[in-house]
């Protein structure tokens, strides 16, 4: 069944995951474009600055936002979504509390199901879903990628059955000020004495600028060509992880020799670091890196080159890690 382009009417948007790296960039753009944006958050006190943007309303969910993932949802969710013309779901995690896939299942699949069912009940006609490149319910190489694939498939199927116009986005790694990818490697490089031992050094990425991701979400809001699409988002150039880390470290003023670890040592590093505070690298991250994060041949590329943006924030990141 073909779902038609809904009218955006009230221009009111429910943005789940609006407090994260991508969410903040998108919230700002939506506010500038004159939308009213509702952002539920579990940690409102950390994100009060967001409410300074015109039209952005932060809703304190306490722990209810996590409850959405565990299905203990207060009935107020559908109530909250009333009068909204679009639901955008950016919620996602890279690491789960235990190492059994359940955390990913809850944050990606159960959360999406609950959010979309509430949206359907509230009569929200449009849904934009954030997935990831390589997401595949069956062939995904990690819990992360399989759960992302299941959530994406479920969203499209539910949308078709319930007349909600769905678009999903499948980005490679996203870069921009406050990203947790290049900034993380810069901070690690600052701690390494000359040589940087790197797991999965030949893993492939096509980093895409957060500003280009935001443009795609904004374009999808009222463009019928996006409905039902699963859109891959890649930057203009593919890189090996070792080249990205070397570039980020050098740009930030900590040039390092990248020592690509053999496979057994990459696995060992993941086993050890998943017990370190903040889980800087886990076995599931290792498994995700076995799938090249690059777009299928012929897929249109997003325009912004890493080298035109990253120096502006990596130098600041280096300054922060030095202090
Ligand atoms: N960044 C990338 O390179 C990249 C690449 C491919 C795909 N993606 C996908 O893009 C999306 C956004 O990524 P990001 O980099 O912006 O991530 P992020 O900075 O970690 O933000 C994640 C957001 O999800 C929310 N969240 C996480 N678990 C939740 C839960 N159980 N209940 C309610 N809210 C929850 C967080 O809220 P709190 O502030 O309350 O924790 C935050 O707003 C994710 O789905 C991610 O998988 C990102």
Image: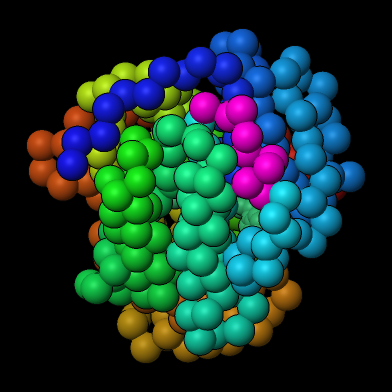
Total numbered circles: 0
In this view, the residue in front, 42 or 164, is: 164
Q: Is residue 253 visible?
A: no
In this view, the residue in front, 189 or 288, is: 288
For residue 146, above or below residue 1: below
In reply to whether residue 81 is colored magenta, the answer given is yes
Question: Which residue is found at the position 56% from the left and 75% from the top?
Answer: 103
Residue 41 in percent (x, y) is at 75, 47
In this view, the residue in front, 243 or 206, is: 206
Residue 190 in percent (x, y) is at 66, 56
Residue 265 in percent (x, y) is at 42, 85
Query: Horizontal placement of 79 versus 167: left or right?
Result: right
**First to last magenta residue range:** 77-85
In reply to whether residue 92 is colored magenta, the answer given is no
Q: Check the image and tell me how it is coloured.
A: rainbow
Question: Which residue is found at the position 49% from the left and 72% from the top?
Answer: 105
Residue 313 in percent (x, y) is at 62, 32
For residue 108, above or below residue 24: below
Where is the N terminus found, in terms of image quarters? top left
Question: Which residue is found at the position 37% from the left and 39% from the top?
Answer: 164
For residue 212, above or below residue 232: above
Question: Which residue is found at the position 28% from the left and 46% from the top?
Answer: 160
In this view, the residue in front, 229 or 255, is: 229
Query: Horizontal placement of 60 versus 116: left or right?
Result: right
Which quadrant of the structure image shows residue 38? top right
Which quadrant of the structure image shows residue 12? top right
């Amino acid at each position: 069944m073909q779902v038609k382009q809904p009218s955006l009417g009230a221009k009111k948007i429910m943005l789940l995951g609006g407090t994260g790296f991508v969410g903040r960039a998108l919230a700002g753009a939506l506010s500038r474009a004159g939308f009213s944006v509702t952002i539920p958050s579990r940690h409102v006190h950390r994100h009060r600055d967001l409410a300074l943007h015109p039209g952005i309303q932060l809703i304190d969910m306490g722990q209810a936002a996590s409850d959405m993932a565990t299905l203990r949802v207060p009935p107020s969710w559908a109530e909250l979504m009333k009068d909204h013309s679009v639901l955008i779901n950016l919620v996602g995690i890279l690491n789960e509390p235990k190492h059994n896939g359940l955390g990913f299942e809850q944050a990606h699949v159960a959360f999406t199901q609950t959010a979309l069912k509430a949206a359907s009940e509230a009569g929200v006609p449009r849904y934009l879903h954030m997935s990831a490149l390589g997401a595949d319910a069956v062939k995904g190489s990690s819990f992360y990628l399989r759960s992302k694939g299941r959530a994406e498939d479920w969203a499209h199927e539910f949308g078709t059955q319930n007349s909600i116009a769905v678009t999903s986005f499948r980005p490679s790694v996203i870069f921009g000020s406050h990203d947790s990818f290049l900034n993380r490697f810069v901070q690690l490089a600052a701690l390494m004495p000359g040589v940087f031992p790197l797991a999965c050094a030949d893993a492939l990425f096509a980093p895409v600028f957060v500003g280009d991701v935001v443009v795609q979400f904004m374009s999808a809001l009222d463009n019928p060509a996006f409905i039902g699409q699963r859109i891959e988002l890649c930057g203009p150039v593919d890189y090996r992880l070792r080249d990205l880390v070397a570039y980020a470290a050098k740009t930030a003023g900590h040039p390092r020799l990248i020592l690509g670890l053999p496979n057994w040592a990459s696995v060992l590093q993941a086993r050890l670091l998943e017990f370190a505070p903040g889980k800087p690298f886990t076995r599931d991250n290792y498994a995700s890196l076995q799938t090249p994060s690059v777009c299928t041949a012929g897929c249109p590329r997003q325009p912004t080159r890493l080298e035109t943006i990253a120096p502006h924030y990596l130098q600041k990141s280096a300054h922060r890690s030095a202090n």
